[in-house]
Amino acid sequence: MFDFPTSENIAMWIFDNLKDKIPISGIKFFEGSNKYCEITK
């Protein structure tokens, strides 16, 4: 599914697949305690 399954790539995939279906301006993808990446418009 992903060539490089980093948290950033997974978060971008989630955001890209949700942004046209529900009204969101961003997501925060957690990969552990105090570790996350954030994708916004």
Image (cartoon, rainbow, N blue to C red):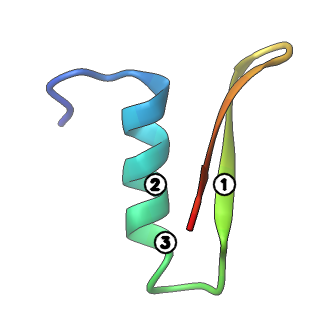
- Looking at the image, do the residues carrying marks 2 and 3 touch, with CB atoms under 8 Å apart? yes
Which quadrant of the structure image shows residue 17? Answer: bottom left
| Sequence order check, earlier mark of 2 and 1 | 2
Percent x, y of residue 5: 32, 23
Q: Amino acid at mark 2?
A: Ile
Q: In this figure, what is the number of numbered marks?
A: 3
Q: Is residue 24 above or below residue 3?
A: below
Q: CA distance from mark 1 to mark 3?
A: 10 Å
Question: On the rendered structure, is 39 left or right of 32?
Answer: left
Percent x, y of residue 6: 39, 21
User: Residue 34 versus residue 2: which sits nearer the camera?
Assistant: 34
Q: Quadrant of the C terminus?
A: bottom right
| Sequence order check, earlier mark of 1 and 3 | 3
Percent x, y of residue 24: 66, 76
Q: Is residue 19 above or below residue 10?
A: below
Q: Amino acid at mark 3?
A: Leu
Q: Residue at x 41, y 38 (%)?
A: 10
Question: On the rendered structure, is 31 left or right of 3?
Answer: right
Q: CA distance from mark 2 to mark 3?
A: 6 Å
Check disc 2 and report the residue beneath it. Answer: 14
Check disc 3 and report the residue beneath it. Answer: 18
Q: CA distance from mark 2 to mark 1?
A: 8 Å
- Looking at the image, do the residues carrying marks 1 and 3 touch, with CB atoms under 8 Å apart? yes
Which quadrant of the structure image shows residue 2? Answer: top left
Q: Amino acid at mark 1?
A: Ile
Numbered disc in front, either 2 or 1 = 1
- Looking at the image, do the residues carrying marks 2 and 1 touch, with CB atoms under 8 Å apart? yes
Q: Disc 1 on helix, strand or loop? A: strand
Check disc 1 and report the residue beneath it. Answer: 27
